[in-house]
Image (cartoon, helix red, strand yellow):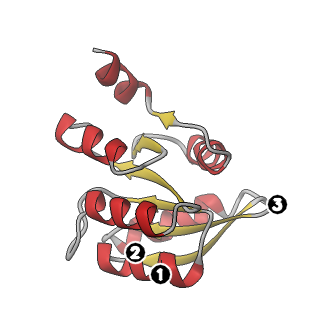
Amino acid sequence: MVITILLADDHKIVREGTRQLLAQSDDIRVIGEAADGIEAVRLAGELKPNVVVMDVRLPKMNGIEATRTITTRYPEIRVLILSAYDDDSYIFPLLEAGAGGYLLKTSSGAELADAIRLVCDGQTVLSPRISAKIVN
């Protein structure tokens, strides 16, 4: 099975780099890119990806609201957060909004691909720093 991905990040270079990293995996295919939260919600509905890889800070609609909207409207679509921020003010609201995982942008391409596979399979994936914050 090929896992289809929608990338949602306001930085074009991050989307391009993530797309190139994921292109190395035969079982993962990026089918769309969104530069803001509203576009992410719209494209999720149109493209029906297996997983949305979502940034937290997005223009027009932040990642928390976009995640909540996508997981409510399209419960079959999983959301994996990929963020530079490990603030509690993001982590807990995103998990409550239905995110299936939270990875930091310090992760490798292989870690991202593995996380996508796990989230697509219904498992929860957290960066070690995020796990530590939740436990504490």
Q: Is residue 78 visible?
A: yes
SS for dot 1: helix
Residue 132 coordinates in the image, percent (x, y):
35, 19
Disc 2 and disc 3: Cα gap in Å? 23 Å
Percent from the top left, x then y, of residue 72?
42, 63
Residue furthest top as drawn:
136
Asked whether the residues under the numbered discs 1 and 3 touch, taking CB atoms below 8 Å apart as contact, a structural biologist would say no
Q: Amino acid at mark 3?
A: Met
Quick one: label 1 or label 3, which is nearer the N terminus? 3
Label 2: how many Cα within 10 Å (few below 14, some 14–19, many 20+): many
Which residue sits at x=63%, y=60%? 22
User: Is 26 placed above or below 135 here?
Assistant: below
Q: Residue at x 43, y 42 (%)?
A: 103
- Where is mark 2, residue-wise? 40
Q: Is residue 64 left or right of residue 1?
A: left
Q: Secondary structure at mark 2?
A: helix
136 or 14: which is nearer to us? 136
Mark 1 to mark 2: distance in Å? 5 Å
**Numbered tag placed on residue 1 in the rendering:** 3
Q: Which mark is residue 85?
A: none
The residue wearing badge 1 is: 43
Residue at the left extreme, as displayed: 89
Give yes or no for contact between labels 1 and 2 (Cβ–Cβ under 8 Å).
yes
SS for dot 3: loop
Q: Quadrant of the C terminus?
A: top left
